[in-house]
Image (cartoon, grey):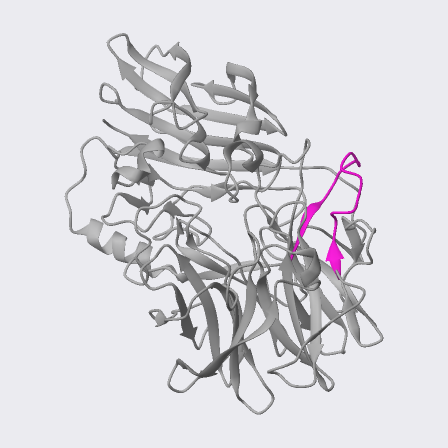
Amino acid sequence: MNRFVLALVACIATLPAWAGDAMFTEVRYAGDDGGPAVGSTQYRNPVVAGFYPDPSAIRVGDDFYLVTSTFGYFPGLPIFHSRDLVSWRQIGNAIDRPSQVNYGNDELTRGLFAASISHHDGTFYIANTCFYCDGGNFIVTAKDPGGPWSDPIWLKFEGIDPSLFFDDDGSAWMVNNGIPEGKMRYDGHRAIWLQQFDAAAKKLVGPRKVLVDGGADPASKPEHIEGPHLFKRDAYYYLTAAEGGTGEQHAQMIWRSRQITGPYEAWSGNPVLTQRDLDPARAYPITSTGHAQFVELKDGSWWAVFLATRPYRGNQYNLGRETFLLPVTWRDGWPVILPRGERVPVVLERPALPRDPQPVPTSGPFEWTERFTADKLPPQWMTIHPPRRAWFATGSDGLRLTPSSTPLGGTGSGGQPAYLAHRLQHHRATLTATLAPYQPAPGELVGLALFQNESHHYIIGVERSEHGAAVALYRRASKDDPATGKRQARIDLPSSDQPVSLRLQLDGARLDVFYAVEPGQWKPVASGLDASLLSTDVAGGFIGATFGPYAFRP
């Protein structure tokens, strides 16, 4: 349950109706990226499409749980459940109360970094880093993975990407990426650290120790070793981590030791997963593979979740880093996710588990309609940073937004845009929002946003000027553009006393924009716009595009 939204609704119920609020009656989504057909015994990668990076997964009995990063979005750290490792359903968010974490007001690419989930003796743990927050690294705990999760317990240690491992004897150990001992030998030189964790006292104890300095082959000066996880098989402790950054040079490495404190031996066949050796001009590429975690099934087989990207041109992708799944094979006591030189398969055989279909798929072609009539938002919807006041509500009439004086490009000013975000999950997608009859104030813009970050986004909405009501399209393509964006098109409306539907149609690097005042009677606003400005290759950073209702009033 989304306690934050329920608290907002309770607050709103005591207030009079807001004058000048915008009402959205529905948002529709349809996406289909094509690809090979999926047989009855197969599944499709990615298993969780769209901006769901840095996956961490565990098995507890017959159940699997998954958590991913969210950076500057709120609620943070979505929790997924599955029984077949393929079909996932979001059951909550670990950070769903504004009081839990103070994100500050930094760029979206900061905030909640790579999280890891673990379980011991009836308690679930998530270890995480809030980047540029005062506290740094923390854990939250829960008896039910759907929540509620505790307030953060801040652990004052240097570095990022903490991961908590429970050994057979009940002892707990934290590994993380950090600055190496002594002088850094080169840019990107990092180390993997280990320290014992007292689960009863919820604090780190004993000395911190470096397990890996630099990477699998220190002489090659590997960069940014990160995302470490520990697991145990037979008599060995295995340490896995990624290096090479989260771009096309990303690669997953493996080490092992007879003792948890080391020394750890790197496998001579590393990396256990990468796509960096493949022809960049290959058709339908999957790139940037890494940040993997291994999961053992009841039957003794092993699988790995990891992040990867699906570029549509060069290294351009608008979806961010997504969650993929592959089986693991063992070679002489070493796990291999994919032999070097092999491409990540899009379709392959499912795990040997009973099928667990979900109401709304997270992979392949799908569509949905949200009318916002429930008393809370579904857990997939987010805001930019935690709200400080009640500016939206759901109910029988739909979604009500109070316009903000902070535009999408003005988040650094200390305010918060009135923007409800849902992750884009396909490169070929149609996004539609319907706005109830509305009288915008002069200078106001209410509509549908397609958002990569503060400096790169599109907005199609209804506005009013001295010439009357109109449908207007705005674009922001650099930090030098106005925070409100530059107007690209404007089409007068005969009246604002009728619903207006707004549509964004994406096909890779192409964006077409439409509006309708009569159901199904779509009229063009602009065609052949450049959607590649929504890619991280152009916009920078490492998050994925989102879309949703937006309201701005200067």
Task: Please say whether residue 288 is one of the residues in the magenta stretch.
Answer: yes
Q: Is residue 339 above or below residue 435?
A: below
- Residue 333: x and y, percent? 80, 77
Q: Is residue 290 above or below residue 418?
A: below
Q: Name which residue lies at 64% across and 81% down.
A: 262
Q: Which picture quadrant has residue 81? A: bottom right
Tell me, yes or no, if residue 292 can be seen here. no
- Residue 475: x and y, percent? 43, 23
Quarter of the picture holding the N terminus: bottom left
Residue 106 as seen in the image, left or right of residue 405 = right
In this orientation, which residue lies closer to the viewer: 432 or 371?
A: 432
**Count of numbered marks:** 0
Dominant secondary structure of the residues highlighted in magenta in the image = loop
In this orientation, which residue lies closer to the viewer: 139 or 215?
A: 215
Q: Is residue 336 above or below residue 307?
A: below
Q: Is residue 101 above or below residue 164?
A: above
First to last magenta residue range: 272-292
Q: Name which residue lies at 58% across and 42% down.
A: 425
Q: Name which residue lies at 85% across and 75% down.
A: 332
Task: Please say whether residue 190 is one of the residues in the magenta stretch.
Answer: no
Tell me, yes or no, if residue 554 can be seen here. yes
- Residue 243: x and y, percent? 64, 57
